[in-house]
Amino acid sequence: MEFMIDTANIAEITKMMESLPLCGVTSNPSILKKEGDVAFFDQLKQIRALIGKERSLHVQVVAMDAEGMIKDAHRILAEIDDQVYVKIPVNMEGLKAMKALKAEGVNITATAIYTEIQGYYAIEAGADYIAPYFNRMENMNIDPCQVISGFAQMIAAGNYPTKILGASFKNIGQVNKALLCGAQAVTVGTDVLAASLDMPAIQKAVDDFNDDWVAIHGVDKEIYKL
C-alpha cells in the first residue's frame, strides 16, 4: 500500500510526515488555490525539498489541448525535476499527450477518471498511476468499487505496471473500500487522515492504560525511568 497526501500546504505536509508513512504528495490547481496567491513553482519546489526524491510528487498540467499539456509537462519537469509524476486528465487530448510523454520516459499519473473505459485507455497508454475519483463517482451513482476492481483485474490479467491511485475521498471508510477493491495507493486529504485516528475509543484505551500504570507506579513514573 502507498499512502499519499492530497495537499500543497507545507505545514500540513510537515505535520503528517512526522507520524504517517507517507509515500508521496499529490496536487492539482484546486488544491493549490487553497494556499492563496502563492508562486506555483516555488511552492512545489518547497514541497519537493521537504519530502525528498524518495517520495513521489504529482503535479497537474492545466492546458486543455495535447500540445499545451506536453509543454506544461516539460516546464514542470524543468522547474522541479525529472522524477515528478505529471498528472494528465483522461480525455482525447490527455491521452494524446500521455502517449507522447511516455515515449519520452516521463512519469504519468492519469487523473479525472470516472469510468472503466477511461482507466483501460490510460493503462494501455502507459500511465504509471491511474486515479479514479471515489467520492465523485459515488455522487454520480457510479459504483467506485466495481470500477476499481475492473482496473485491478485488467492490470493483473495483462501484467501491466500501472498502479491504481484512489482519489477524491470524503471519509476513511471510502479509503478502506478503495484499498480492499484493489487500489495499490490512495491520496487523501489531511482532514480525512487526521479523522481516521481521532476516535473516542482510541483515546479511551490510551487513557485506561495510563490510569492503570499510574495506579501502580505513581504519576511521576515512566518505563524509561524505572
Image (cartoon, rainbow, N blue to C red):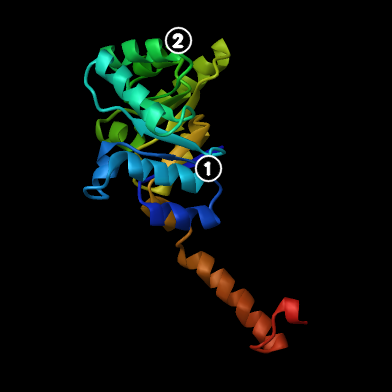
Closest to the observer, 47 or 20? 47
Closest to the observer, 11 or 165? 11
* Residue 214 in picture, x, y percent from top left: 65, 85
Residue 60 appears anywhere in the view: yes
Q: Which residue occupies 26% across, 37% down? A: 29
Question: Badge 2 is on which residue?
Answer: 103
* Residue 114 in picture, x, y percent from top left: 31, 25
Tally the marks: 2
Q: Which residue occupies 24% across, 44% down? A: 33
203 up-or-down from 1: above or below = below
Residue 174 appears anywhere in the view: no
Closest to the observer, 212 or 22? 22
Question: Badge 1 is on which residue?
Answer: 52
Q: Is residue 3 left or right of residue 226?
A: left
175 up-or-down from 181: above or below = below
Q: Which of marks 1 and 2 is nearer the N terminus?
A: 1
Judged from this view, the residue extending furthest toward the front is 78
* Residue 79 in picture, x, y percent from top left: 38, 32
110 up-or-down from 22: above or below = above
Q: Which residue occupies 42% across, 11% down? A: 125
State which quadrant residue 97 falls in.
Answer: top left
Q: Which residue occupies 36% across, 27% down? A: 87
20 up-or-down from 113: above or below = below
Q: Is mark 1 on a helix, strand or loop?
A: loop
